[in-house]
């Protein structure tokens, strides 16, 4: 696609800009977001939104997602690398353009992963608190009927047990009670992520 340098006629300002992504996770005070130091990218725990604007960066996109203890915010900033007078022709090498596009693609993938993990944790928390916590406790500390405590159980053991309940493969008084509460695959995975996150289940280290 990019075999030769690309020559672009710029009518107003530079087409080529630096791009960076900064974020703040589990934030609970939106009114202070503009002045709190952001993580990642050029912010790197040093610069806030206000600081970035003072340094010549402009906001190109903002996204939010639910975190475990607040909201996750992601900012995409851009900054013109140079200003070109009207009618001036600027040459951008294909290698520079490739690098810029690769950076944007990498940051997009990272943000999609953050959003996906945040959604899974939020869903796991919702399912556990609505269907499980009443008998097993908020932190898996209770052992109702003939069931074991969830706290300290391995993620694989929990997953196998829930699958067996759903398939009616367990023969116990707990199995009769658990039948209606057996979780579909996606709910089970999200609950496991949530319980691992609050240190109830112990993940198996491969």
Image (cartoon, rainbow, N blue to C red):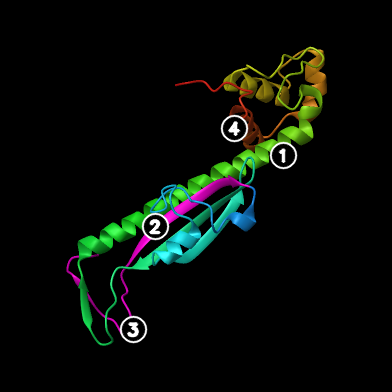
Q: Is residue 115 visible?
A: no
Residue 193 is marked as: 4
Q: Are marks 2 and 4 in contact (CB under 8 Å)?
A: no
* Position in image of residue 9 (x %, y %): 26, 82
Q: Say few, some or many: other residues with alpha carbon within 10 Å of mark 4 (under 14 / 14 to 19 / 20 or more).
A: many
Q: Earlier in the sequence, mark 1 or mark 4?
A: 1
Residue highlighted by disc 2: 20
Q: Earlier in the sequence, mark 3 or mark 1?
A: 3
Residue highlighted by disc 1: 126
In the drawing, does residue 189 fall left or right of residue 20?
right
Location of residue 169 by image quarter: top right
| Disc 2 secondary structure class | strand
Q: Earlier in the sequence, mark 2 or mark 3?
A: 3
Mark-to-mark CA distance, 2 and 3: 23 Å
Q: Are marks 1 and 4 in contact (CB under 8 Å)?
A: no
Q: Range of the magenta residues? A: 1-27
């Amino acid at each position: 696609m990019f075999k030769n340098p690309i020559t672009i006629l710029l009518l107003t300002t530079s087409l080529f800009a630096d791009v960076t992504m900064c974020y703040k996770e589990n934030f609970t005070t939106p009114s202070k977001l503009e002045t709190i130091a952001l993580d990642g990218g050029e912010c790197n725990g040093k610069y806030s939104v206000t600081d970035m604007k003072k340094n010549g960066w402009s906001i190109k996109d903002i996204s939010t997602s639910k975190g475990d203890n607040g909201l996750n915010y992601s900012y995409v900033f851009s900054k013109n690398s140079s200003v070109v007078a009207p009618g001036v022709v600027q040459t951008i090498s294909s290698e520079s353009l490739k690098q810029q596009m690769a950076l944007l693609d990498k940051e997009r993938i990272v943000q999609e992963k953050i959003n996906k993990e945040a959604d899974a944790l939020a869903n796991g928390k919702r399912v556990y608190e609505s269907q499980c916590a009443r008998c097993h406790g908020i932190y898996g500390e209770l052992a109702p009927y003939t069931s074991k405590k969830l706290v300290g159980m391995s993620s694989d053991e929990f997953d196998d047990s829930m699958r067996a309940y759903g398939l009616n493969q367990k023969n116990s008084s707990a199995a009769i009670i658990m039948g209606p509460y057996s979780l579909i695959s996606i709910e089970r995975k999200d609950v496991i992520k949530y319980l691992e996150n609050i240190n109830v289940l112990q993940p198996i280290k491969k």
